[in-house]
Image (cartoon, helix red, strand yellow):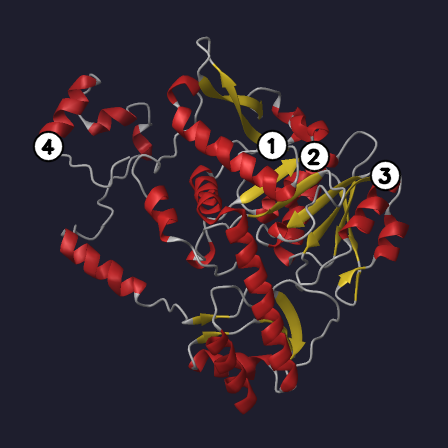
């Protein structure tokens, strides 16, 4: 896919001749005549490149990018090395082509293989797929993986991201499964309630680590409770935090999922993002989408192949456990390039710096009356009370070109700090709030 393709009238004529038709209308000759527009659609006239560029810049200028960002809640502003966009932006990779023919798709297959390998290293799991649409979709797909004839109930913590819960409700409703929300206590999953709810009908248990409120769950104990009931254990994890916390595998997870946006993808006003999925070997054949493997050809040369495709094209649709047929290939490659550029130490440094700055912000906010709502260990997000109301606090920060935390309600704010924010920016935010 090139950045610019010219097409003259002569080019157009030769293309039509090559496929044996006289005009573009012949491409639609099977469309009934009564479906064609009889009147001019009244579209505006075309513009020159300069005019279009001017209009697009005017539209883009309506967006505002804050100098400082103290908001997370599922999408995070991390530092992205310049090499990431430089590599991923090459025309060679800007294609939506699906690698059905492995022998001519070695480049894209290798990039997917490298991505899968890095996701396995982050999660500690045995195998990863080639990605799904986003973190919420990954969580819902993981729940579907756990279902069998005798078990169709899914338990999900109330402390997960609301978007995850919403998508899971949609999936389970459509599949005829039961979704039960495990209540939260003091900002974390109520493990006593989980133990009571987990029974012989439970197919899977899902918790988020760190959870929506930024707190670190007792993930290992949650896994023990799930397995004691004979259920599968799913962990939805932040990939940056995964570099310094116990891996899902260490916590006993059968499936690890998460939102891959922190791995080199800018906020981009909401997407596109990336859903990663990884599992143990026994769950490999239930992973949706595709899995790329490395092998050798008949001459002993390294080669990449589509090892597994659990896709509805190959089985009866009504028997498919998943109907996802695509993957976020360019986003997955972005994640792979980011991980390669940062390396294990770089991602760990980003995680440690994020945690340190978030704890510093929490301490400074505490000093001016913004008390933490929930006690306990947290990674880089935390909830505080807002003494004068969340709206007043966030409006004051906005005037200082600071995007404050997310208002959970009128009096509580979910804050976030990453390595991309400086101590001076944090101090400025605290000073603004102190004046409020």
Which residue has dot 4 on it? 9
On residue 201, which mark appears? 3
Q: Say whether residue 377 is left or right of residue 420.
A: right
Pick out the residue farthest to the left.
10
Give the mark nearest the N terminus, 4 or 3. Answer: 4
Pick out the residue farthest to the top.
298
Give the SS element for disc 2.
helix
Question: Which of label 1 and label 4 is nearer to you?
Answer: 1
Question: Which of label 4 and label 3 is nearer to you?
Answer: 3
**In contact (CB < 8 Å): disc 2 and disc 1:** yes
Give the SS element for disc 1.
loop
The residue closer to the viewer here, 48 or 191, is 191
Question: Which of label 1 and label 3 is nearer to you?
Answer: 1
Q: What crowding class fits label 3: few (fewer than 14 Cα within 10 Å), some (14-19), or many (20 or more)?
A: some
Give the mark nearest the N terminus, 2 or 4. Answer: 4
Residue 41 visible, this angle? yes
Question: Which of label 2 and label 4 is nearer to you?
Answer: 2
Give the mark nearest the N terminus, 3 or 2. Answer: 2
**In contact (CB < 8 Å): disc 2 and disc 4:** no
Which residue has dot 1 on it? 288
Give residue 29's quadrant in the image.
Answer: top left
Q: Is residue 277 above or below residue 375?
A: above
Q: Report how far apart the C-alphas of labels 2 and 4 lie in the structure.
A: 52 Å
Residue at left 85%, top 39%?
Answer: 201
Which residue has dot 2 on it? 145
């Amino acid at each position: 896919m090139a950045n610019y393709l010219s097409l003259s009238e002569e080019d157009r004529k030769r293309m039509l001749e090559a496929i044996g038709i006289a005009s573009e209308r012949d491409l639609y000759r099977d469309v009934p005549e009564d479906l064609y527009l009889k009147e001019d659609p009244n579209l505006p006239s075309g513009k020159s490149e300069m005019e279009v560029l001017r209009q697009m810049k005017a539209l883009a200028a309506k967006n505002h990018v804050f100098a400082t960002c103290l908001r997370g809640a599922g999408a995070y502003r991390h530092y992205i090395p310049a090499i990431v966009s430089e590599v991923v932006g090459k025309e060679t990779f800007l294609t939506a082509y699906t690698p059905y023919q492995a022998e001519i798709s070695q480049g894209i297959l290798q990039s997917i293989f490298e991505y899968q390998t890095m996701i396995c290293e982050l999660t500690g799991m045995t195998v990863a797929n080639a990605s799904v649409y986003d973190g919420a979709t990954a969580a819902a797909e993981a729940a579907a993986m756990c279902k069998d004839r005798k078990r169709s109930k899914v338990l999900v913590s109330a402390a997960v991201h609301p978007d995850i819960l919403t998508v899971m409700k949609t999936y389970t409703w459509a599949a005829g499964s039961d979704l039960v929300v495990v209540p939260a206590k003091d900002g974390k999953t109520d493990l006593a309630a989980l133990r009571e709810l987990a029974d012989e009908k439970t197919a899977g248990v899902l918790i988020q680590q760190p959870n929506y409120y930024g707190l670190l769950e007792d993930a290992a104990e949650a896994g023990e409770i799930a397995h004691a009931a004979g259920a599968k254990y799913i962990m939805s994890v932040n990939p940056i935090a995964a570099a310094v916390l116990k891996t899902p595998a260490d916590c006993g997870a059968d499936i690890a999922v998460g939102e891959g946006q922190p791995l080199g993808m800018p906020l981009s006003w909401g997407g596109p993002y990336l859903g990663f999925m990884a599992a143990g070997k026994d769950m490999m054949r239930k992973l949706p989408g595709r899995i790329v493997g490395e092998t050798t050809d008949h001459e002993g040369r390294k080669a990449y192949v589509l090892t597994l495709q659990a896709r509805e094209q190959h089985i009866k649709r009504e028997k498919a456990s998943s109907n996802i047929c695509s993957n976020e290939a360019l986003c997955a490659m972005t994640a792979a390039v980011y991980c390669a550029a940062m390396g294990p130490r770089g991602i760990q440094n980003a995680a440690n710096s994020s945690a340190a700055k978030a704890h510093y912000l929490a301490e400074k906010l505490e000093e001016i009356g913004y008390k933490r709502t929930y006690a306990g260990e947290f990674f880089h997000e935390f909830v505080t009370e807002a003494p004068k109301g969340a709206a007043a606090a966030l409006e004051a920060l906005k005037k200082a070109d600071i995007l404050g935390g997310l208002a959970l309600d009128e009096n509580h704010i979910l804050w976030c700090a990453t390595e991309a924010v400086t101590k001076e920016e944090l101090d400025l935010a605290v000073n603004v709030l102190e004046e409020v």
